[in-house]
Image (cartoon, helix red, strand yellow):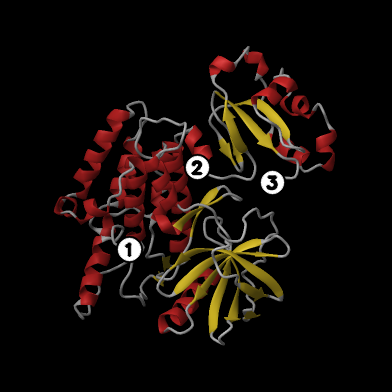
Amino acid sequence: MAHCVPSEPTSKVQAPESIPSQVSVDQSMRPVLFEIFGEIWTVQSRLGQGVSASVYQVSSGRAATAAVKEFQGDSQGGDYGYHKERAVLEDIQGHKNIVTLYGVFTNHNCVGVATRCLLLELLDVSLSELLVRRSNGVKGVSRPQKGHSMWLVQHCARDILEALAFLHREGYVHADLKPRNILWSADDECFKLIDFGLSFKQGNQDVKYIQTDGYRAPEAELQNSLAQAGMEGDSGCTAAIDLWSLGVILLEMFSGIKLKDTVRSQDWKDNSVAVVNRIFASNGVMCPAIPVYHLRDLIKSMLLNNPKQRCTAEAALLNPFFSIPFAPHIEDLVLLPSPVLRLLNLIDDSHLHNDEEYEGVCGVRQLQRLQRSPAAADRPNLRREVCGGHLLPAERLQERLPVPDGAVRISLLLHPPHLKNSAVFWPTSRILILSTPGCRCRH
């Protein structure tokens, strides 16, 4: 059994929250145990593996779940990476769009090798996975657009720009922004930045090779080339390199196209703005009703070759693109997990007997309070109490979709495009939602 002793505590980290875990242990793996802060944690699965570190999903006896990033103890890079990432994370804790560091500890494995570990917030799906799923399509959902919905692009852009604005105000550059390092949090219903192993203080860059191929800014490309040639030189890498990476990411989300080969082309190097215009022109024909020009201008302002002319994160947040009240597509609710609302079935208009069956607006916060009440299952009129309208009879609901024991089924009409905290309002769409009284909801 691996034995871990906690390193010195830090006042900037918090304990992981106990949450129900429904993930079973991967039986193909040799069981691995960590003793973290006097408690045994079991490895559920390996989430990823790099040159100097591996990331695992772990759970404790309290049903708490977290992620452990274990750095290789027998390599200089692993030890350096641990101290580097720990220092950055401890310095920037507290922002909702940056992964939470719960603590640090040292693991002594069965052969006596000590490894340094970070105990991190467990997040859900990466933007990289979302891009793959979008390219493959969602079963039962047809869309004329290749890329993600404008709502999802806007949501991601705003979340990451807010993270970058905070990071840059603190004097840091992320230096490795890519879809794999942007993850969705089902608990907080937002995107978060992870992996600060290449981050550096602006004006004090201590890493020669930065960013990932395909998302690398021109000045970072020059710096990497000089480093490979053994030449010294200041290419002027600043926070602007993060905006370049985000511009490429947003263009991939909109177009649904992997742009790695495109950004390597001479056409892109000569005039990236013209390439962006062509991509938007071709996609805009497919969805002429969607106002995409604000997004196009935002992306172009991030992809200027001169880093001094690129927009800053704070300036980008003022772009008119973020004032447009886009509504989520049905696919967005399928792709992005949420602990509050579980979408089970989209009811077609042909199934409606009359509009009154689905009238009424659910107060989401009121519903959350009722769900947390132990007496919720004993209230037969809960659906009517919450929705306050003429609802589909219970027996017809039962015919449409089986109701698990202890569940409260609610049919409602979710109203005009507005997003607030964990509530998702869906314009003019009739949906069927399953919510269990015991589900953990945030207020």
Q: CA distance from mark 3 to mark 1?
A: 37 Å
Does residue 268 appear left or right of residue 125 in this picture? left
Residue linked to disc 3: 441
Residue linked to disc 1: 212
Residue type, label 1 = Thr
Residue linked to disc 2: 335
Residue 104 placement (x, y as % from top left): 59, 75
Residue 222 placement (x, y as % from top left): 22, 68
Kindly check if marks 2 and 3 are in contact, taking CB atoms under 8 A apart as contact: no
Q: Nearer the viewer, residue 191 or 115?
A: 115
Residue type, label 2 = Leu
Q: CA distance from mark 2 to mark 3?
A: 19 Å
**If the image is split into quadrants, where does the N terminus sit?**
bottom right
Q: CA distance from mark 2 to mark 1?
A: 26 Å
Q: Nearer the viewer, residue 231 or 178?
A: 178
Disc 3 on helix, strand or loop? loop
Residue type, label 3 = Cys
Seen as rendered, the residue at the extreme front is 28
Q: Which mark is first along the chain, 3 or 2?
A: 2
